[in-house]
Image (cartoon, helix red, strand yellow):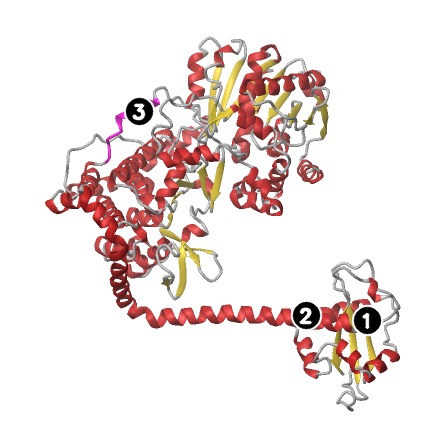
Amino acid sequence: MFALDSEWNLSFAGCGFLGIYHMGVASCLKENAPWLVRNARKVYGASAGALTAASLVSGVCLGQSCADFIEITKEARRQRLGPLHPSFNLVKCLRQAMWRIMPNDIWVHVSEKLCVSLTRVSDGENVLISDFSSKEEVIQALICSAFVPVYCGVIPPSFRGVRYVDGGISDNLPSYDLKTTITVSPFSGESDICPRDNSSNFHELRFTNTSIQFNTGNLYRLSRALFPPEPKVLIEMCKEGYRDALRFLKANNLLFHSRPSLGPHSAAVDEEEEVIEMDVDQHEIEEARLLVGRMHQTSNMLLVRRPATRDLESVNLETLPPQLHRALTEASKERNDLLSYVSNTLPVRVASLLMSPYILPIESAISFTFRLLEWLPDVPEDFRWMGEQTHRVLRHVYLRAIGRIGHRLSARVSCNLELRKCLTMPTSVAQSCDTSAADHHALPLGVSDSKLTCSSVSDPSFEKWVEESTKFGFEMNIQAGLFQPPGAAGPFQGRKFSLTCSARDENPSGPLALGTDLHHIDNGCMPRFFLEDD
Amino acid sequence: MAQLRAVEERILSCLKVPVLSRFVPCSIRECLWTVTACADKKAAFHRTPLVLIHGFAGGVGLWALNLDALASRRTVHAFDLLGFGRSSRPHFVHDACAVEHCFVESIEAWREALGLPQMVLLGHSLGGFLAASYAIEHPERVKHLILVDPWGFPEKPQNFEDRLPTWLRAAGLLVSQFNLLAGLRMAGPWGPGLVQKFRPDFTTKFSSMFQDDTISEYIYHCNAQAPSGEIAFKTMTDSLGWAKRPMLQRVGLIAPRVSISFIYGAKSWIDCSSGYWTKALRSSSCVQVFIIQGAGHHVYADQYKAFNHCVQKICDSQD
């Protein structure tokens, strides 16, 4: 299925706090098939998937990332309002964690390999970024990709001067070509590595490329994507990811050596092993290609025998790499001191619940002040951006309004002009307009104002009308004086106006013959007239 | 209906094989919309015809990528199930057993009307379930049974619901009260856009044949009409997708001389273990399991070349 003899990609779906699942998958890939990651052409990622992709590509210690991840979720769960509490700043937490754990030369490792999915704010288009020139840029791109609007804040972060938000909005599972991309998603569906919910439900939704099966398990996961569950559940998800990845590797014969689970070992040992693996790597790939080639030769389809799938999985139930497992359990440990014990007793919890309406505003005020202070350096840029945005919105509204007013005025002119069966205006009408004040009021206000002509002429669709009208042969002159203000020898006296007429209907039944009763062209194809100072 | 006909005609006009389409009566009041394709009548004469049964919310148009290849040497009949696509949309009773029987009898009457002595029966998803059910009741008419990602085989685990939080169970219960595609019909003029929005994959699956969103339009019009087959399906399901009468319990009832082939998509969530279970349960008869790599639930469209090749091979092994 994956043309391993040519090239392949990896893609991690965006999923908010379910990103811990990706960590499990990543650790499995790193442990059992490191060549699959190292030789992948690109590693795509959106949102939380991008974070995992970055750690995987850069070779950051996954145990450390997992521990930090759990720390962040604990931070998010600390308050009663969860991640919505104003004191929780996800972007800041992420940024700090990434600065801490990522190596300084990360951009060298991830450039051209890591591909981060972003959504451009200005037009909602998907953008894939894969070239980075500094650690700061890598982190900024990842922050942009993880920035869920409103949830994380109001002002979207910028990357190289362009504002971006969560990549999941436009493309949650980016891939260059689906057939050669190994897709990883924590939602059960049609991704390559995803939980199997063992449900026989076949209703499925696609959320910007991510296949999500319509079942209760996924409903639960979706609800947990932005509101993290307990660390215990997160660890389960991590294990699930590890298991699913392992199952994928086994099913596709990508697992070539099953390393026995080693005892606890230090990071240094791990690194040594990495080096050794680098040497065997080439050999492994040759082996893989041979096998895959043989597979392809025998048949396009694989007659796979999986006799005892159950015990295959149960054996590997606890095979999270020991280092990762230790990091996870340590991170998830609740504090067991006196303070936490006291705060967990019922009276204290009730008291804190009752107090929350009073405490919340104070806390909010404090955290807002802090945020404001942190925001200060960015204020000029953000304000400039907001100014630009407001300007754009206003301009858009203005243009539309102008367009509409122009339409309405010209429509009014057309309604009020009494045009009889012939296209030349009967002089009697003109004269009656001229003399009686009541009739004059029948004409729209300002009709005699030459500005009207100008505004109509400046109407953007005017040119189109002119085009149409010439197509139908409606171009004629009427005598001026028609729109003369009563009792005054106005500026229009004796001047010529050209009257342009066209039908609004896109497909009129045929060219209107001269002499047609224009009043019959009804139902939205009211003829339009333009007064143009000749 | 007129729009559905127009879209379907557009789809069928892309086929290379000559296609005959008409309504075939399956009872006094009801008839099934049937499409018959055959490229080489001479070669097809001695071969058992292949009958395709589509899955839930589908129709004959979804076989667009397969008819050309499958009909090259063999007559292929594809029909819209009762209550789906362009077929009649009767009111089904609210009893899982009776509904299943109703479907089976409609297929049997259809076969009789066409005068087919025997057929190779291929069913996808819900169609797979019904094909298996048909084979239980009329084994003499089935030369070979091909089940493509069949729905409704495994049993619902005992403690399935205990593991879920309460609010989720409540939500599940609430959702199961409604017809799943009701939202689509309620959306009115936005319906086709909704299909395109939530299932853009169909357009990509069929992109080798149609560049525009013909297929999502087709799916929309298939399901924009009064729900009938959909209600029948709901009657046969139990809490979001499990079958009330799982087929795995009854697969032993199919006469041993009917050989069965399972075709699964490797990415699909339909558990291929039921294929292996069937193999274990029917040790006295021939059961094969094929897994097509890189394909999801809609195997016939995801990897249509591999699928066609596989089905042809299976059919050729019969006659």
Separation of disc 2 and disc 1 at Cα? 21 Å
Give A519 or B281, whichever is nearer the viewer.
A519
The percent coordinates of residue B95 (x first, y second) are: 55, 20
User: What is the spatial separation of the Cα atoms under label 1 and label 3, in whole angstroms?
Assistant: 82 Å
Tell which of A103 and A13 is nearer to you. A13
Disc 1 target residue: A474
- The region drawn magenta spans A309-320
Tell whether label 3 touches label 1 (CB within 8 Å): no
**First of labels 2, 1 by sequence position:** 2
B21 with respect to A474 (left or right):
left
Give how far across and how far down residue A371 sits, in percent. Answer: 28, 64
Residue under pointer 3: A312
Which of B127/B144 is in front?
A: B127
The chain under label 3 reads: A
Label 3 crowd (10 A; few <14 / some 14-19 / many >=20): few
> What secondary structure is marked by label 1?
loop
Residue designated by label 2: A408
Secondary structure of the residue carrying tag 2 is helix
Q: Amino acid at mark 2?
A: Arg
Q: Nearer the viewer, residue B200 or A419?
A: A419
The residue under the point 37% across, 22% down is B158
